[in-house]
Each structure stands twice: as structure tokens, then as C-alpha cells.
Image (spheres, rainbow, N blue to C red):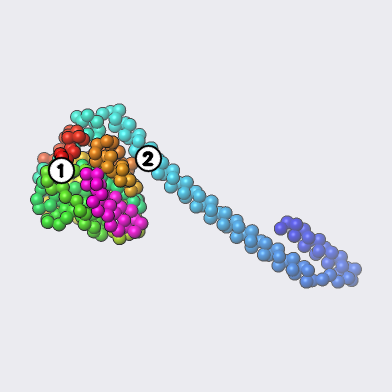
Amino acid sequence: MQGLKDRLENLEQQQMRANISGASFPSELRDLLQRRLGELEKQLLKKVSSLEQEKSMLSNATAAYREKTETTLNSLVERINELEKGGGDFKSPEQFKLSLPQRTNYLYGRITKSLPEMYAFTLCMWIKSNASPGIGTPFSYGVPGQANEIVLIEWGNNPIELLINDKVAQLPIEVRDGKWHHICVSWTTRDGQWDAYQDGEKLGTGDNLAAWHPIKPGGVIILGQEQDVVGGRFDAGQAFVGELSQVNIWDRVLKPTEVQSMANCSTYLPGNIISWLANNVEVFGRGAFKRPVEGCQERLPKA
């Protein structure tokens, strides 16, 4: 483009000399070069704009990757710190259970951490209950403007339900026999796809559950109560009665082999978003306790 500018300047100088000498210079060539120069300047500006957009997108992707890496590293550091300190009265920080023995509106546990914005998740836990009718609400996550952002509930004679943004899917899970069961539910915003596992076996799958809805960040996680407002206004009729342990959350859909390996006690996989640690769970209400949990092999269903 600089070469064309130089050529145009030369032509204009020649035109001036020609005017002085009385000779004529063809204006068509000058007009053509000016048009070509204008077109090249537009192409250059378009290319610069495209490069700036690519740079911005790359910067955003880098920031998102950095944030995810920092979250994972912080989770690992926290896990190492807990292991170094020990779990108080527990053999290790995750070897405890939350006991909620009565159906009231004042017994519950609260996770001290919140969730980030998520486009997929897996929630797993060990659960034991023989409450009737319905085990109540083992897990609820509420955010401002939506108290039912994520809820796992069984009330009355209804099956266990998974709520995402107050949309409902009924799950083929049965845990009201007073025995320990390992359950997992996974969900992704893409088509609202969900899967339900019990004792390592996938029992149900579906879609169109709050499709394309992102899980909102900054809410409150309550164990044992359903939230009518964020962090409160509990209804005793929806309270969970029983015991919970190793409630973990990942920001991805776990593979079936990962779920099975936890359910059969061949491995323990802490959540990268919420991990079950004694210091992460606060207990409220007289009668609710954190206690040492039975060994994993003891929790397995008897043949």
C-alpha cells in the first residue's frame, strides 16, 4: 500500500509539472489509483478489526482456563491442608456423616462454600433413610431469585425428584429401606440431559430438564431442608430424616466407570467444586450431629 501511495505522489508531482509546462496528464489513472488505495485501506482496517477480535477471544479463553485451573488447584491445596491437620474426631476429613434424626424445620447442615456458574454438574452422596412418607430433601441449592436452583427431594408418596431452575424430573431411585446407598445425579445444560445412578448402576436418563440454563453462582447449599427463600424458610414436611455422607459436586458429567468405582468402594473421588470435608459442613439445630461414618465396605448393600 505504501508503494501505491508513493506512485500516486509521483503521479501528482508529474501532473503539477505537466500543468506548469502546459501538458495534460490523464486523470483516469489518478482516479483509478485513488479507488484502489481506498479499497486496500478498507481491507486493512477490516483485517486489523478481525485480529483484535481474535485477540479478545483468546484472552477470554485464557482467563477462563486460568480460573478453572486455579479452582482445581485451590481444591487440591484445601484437601492437602485438611489431610495434614486431620479431621478432628474422624480418621480422615471425609470420614464423617451428617445425622438428621427428626423431621423438623431447624435441623440441617450448611456447606460453607457456594457454587460457581456451571453448565454441567454431577452430585454424588451416600444416603441412609427409612423415613415415611418420603425421605424429604437431602440437598438444596438456592440463589437470589430462584430458591430451587438445584434440589433433590422426595416428599409424600412421590418418587425422588431432581429440580433444576424449578423444572422437575422424576428419578427411578429407591432408598427408603434404612440401608446405605450411593446415589449420583448428573446434568448438562446441553439439551437438559440428566442421568441417575444408584449403587453404581445407571437407572434412568432423560433430557429437556432446564435445557440451556446455566447454574447460577453465589447461592446457598443446605443439606436436609428445602429452601423457600435463599438459606431459610424451611418446611418441616419437606425435611430430610436420616444420614448423609460424602456429598461431592463436580462441574462436569462423571463417567459411568467413575461413579461405579466410588459406589463399590474401589476408589474415593472428591468433588472438584464441593468436596466433603469436616470443615466445610456446619451443623444447625439441637439433635443434628457430625459423627464418624461406617467404613465404605460396611456401607455396601449386602448380597
- Return the mark for residue 174: none
Magenta-colored segment: predominant secondary structure: strand
Q: Residue at x 40, y 40 (%)?
A: 70
Queried whether the magenta region covers residue 113, the answer comes back as: no
The reply to whether residue 83 is in sight is: yes
Decide which of 55, 250 is in the foreground and name it. Answer: 250
Ranked by sequence position, the earlier of labels 1 and 2 is: 2
Amino acid at circle 1 = Lys
Pointer 1 and pointer 2: residues touching (CB < 8 Å)?
A: no
The x, y position of residue 299, in whole percent, is 18, 37
The question of residue 188 being in magenta is answered with yes
**Residue ID at (15%, 57%):** 158
Residue type at the position of mark 2: Thr
* Mark 1 and mark 2: Cα distance apart in space: 30 Å
Q: Residue placed at 37% from the left, 40% from the top?
A: 72
**Quarter occupied by residue 52:** bottom right
Q: In the picture provided, is 82 more to the left or to the right than 235?
A: right
Q: Which residue is mark 1?
A: 128
Please name whichever residue, 213 or 56, is drawn nearer the observer in this view of the structure: 213
**Relative height, residue 211 to residue 253 (above, below):** below
Pointer 2: what residue? 72
Q: Secondary structure at mark 1?
A: strand
Q: Which residues are magenta?
A: 183-207
